[in-house]
Image: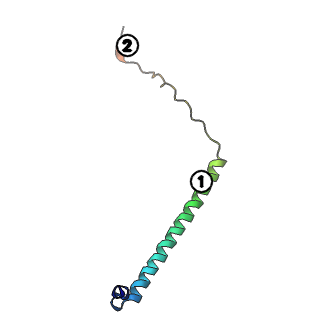
Amino acid sequence: MDGFLSMGGYAAYVWSSYGAATVILVGLLVLSLSGLRRVERTLATLEAAKPRRRREAKASPAPTSATPAAETTP
């Protein structure tokens, strides 16, 4: 186990790299979550300020003015 932790004499470089990567990844996670919360708050504020539009009932399709040629011929 001691050999693994010493990394063949390169432990200072290896463990500091792992530490730096961990700090960077945790920092990115914190920034991402705080940005997500900020955007969610902004969205909630905008949705609360905007009046809701009622969805119009779908009416039957409007009749077309063009009729087939067979119906117009006497």
Q: Quadrant of residue 52?
A: top right
Q: Where 27 falls versus 57 (above or below)?
A: below
Q: Where 5 falls versus 53 (above or below)?
A: below
Give the percent coordinates (x, y) of residue 69: 35, 16
- Seen in the image, is 37 located left or right of residue 71? right
- Seen in the image, is 53 located left or right of residue 29? right
Q: Residues within 10 Å of mark 2 (few under 14, many from 20)?
A: few
Amino acid tagged 2: Glu
Q: Residues within 10 Å of mark 1 (few under 14, many from 20)?
A: few
Disc ID at residue 43: 1
Q: Which residue is mark 2?
A: 71
Question: Residue extending furthest front?
Answer: 1
Q: Where 49 falls versus 70 (above or below)?
A: below
On the rendered image, what quadrant is the C terminus found in? top left
Q: Where 56 falls versus 14 (above or below)?
A: above
Q: Quadrant of residue 5?
A: bottom left
* Residues at marks 2 and 1, CA–CA distance in whole angstroms: 55 Å
